[in-house]
Image (spheres, rainbow, N blue to C red):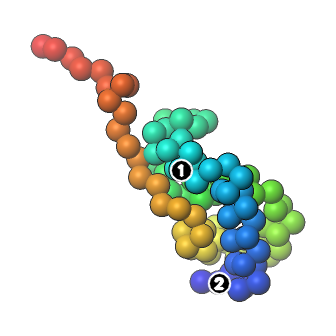
Amino acid sequence: MKITQEHYDALKEAIDKYIEANGKEHLIITYETGHFYKSDKVRLLQQRFCFDLLYCAGVPELIREIYKYANDDHIFTALKKICPTVTRKVETSRTVRKWG
């Protein structure tokens, strides 16, 4: 992981605070069931979830500092260790069945 320990700890603290304030289970269910903006366009759900949490954590100055020496791949590696895991769930209520 290319992110420094100091930056990793700051990211973890900010994201954990956001998750606690908004409810971990609520956030997971929202993403797993596709109830977020442009969910139909998302192919990499875990990556989208992680970067959305990073954005919502409200630490733009920290993110700018990290981007001085790291790229999205490095940041995503750190975020995967910090953020809860999400898996796309099929919604039966949206399933359209064709009888033929």
Which element type, helix, strand or loop, lies under badge 2? Answer: loop
Residue 1's disc is none
Which element type, helix, strand or loop, lies under badge 1? Answer: helix
Residue occupying the point 73% across, 70% down:
13
Is residue 69 at all visible to an observer of this figure? no
Residue corresponding to mark 2: 2
Drawn side of residue 12 relative to residue 77, left or right = right
**In this orientation, which residue lies closer to the viewer: 83 or 26?**
26
Task: Please identify the residue farthest to the left as the structure is shown.
Answer: 100
**Residue 32 against residue 84 in the figure, above or below:** above
**Residue 66 against residue 95 in the figure, above or below:** below
Residue occupying the point 32% across, 29% down:
92
The Cα–Cα distance between marks 2 and 1, rounded to whole angstroms, is 29 Å
> Which quadrant does the N terminus fall into?
bottom right
**In this orientation, which residue lies closer to the viewer: 35 or 1?**
35
Residue 75 location, x and y as percent? 64, 71
Query: Looking at the picture, which amino acid does disc 1 mark?
Result: Glu
Query: Looking at the picture, which amino acid does disc 2 mark?
Result: Lys
Quarter of the view holding residue 2: bottom right
Residue 48 location, x and y as percent? 57, 52
Residue 41 location, x and y as percent? 51, 39
Residue corresponding to mark 1: 25
Drawn side of residue 45 relative to residue 12, left or right = left
> Which quadrant does the C terminus fall into?
top left
Is residue 32 at all visible to an observer of this figure? yes
**Residue 72 against residue 45 in the figure, above or below:** below
Drawn side of residue 13 relative to residue 48, left or right = right
In the image, which is nearer the foreground, mark 2 or mark 1?
1
Task: Please identify the residue farthest to the top as the structure is shown.
Answer: 100
Residue 20 location, x and y as percent? 67, 57
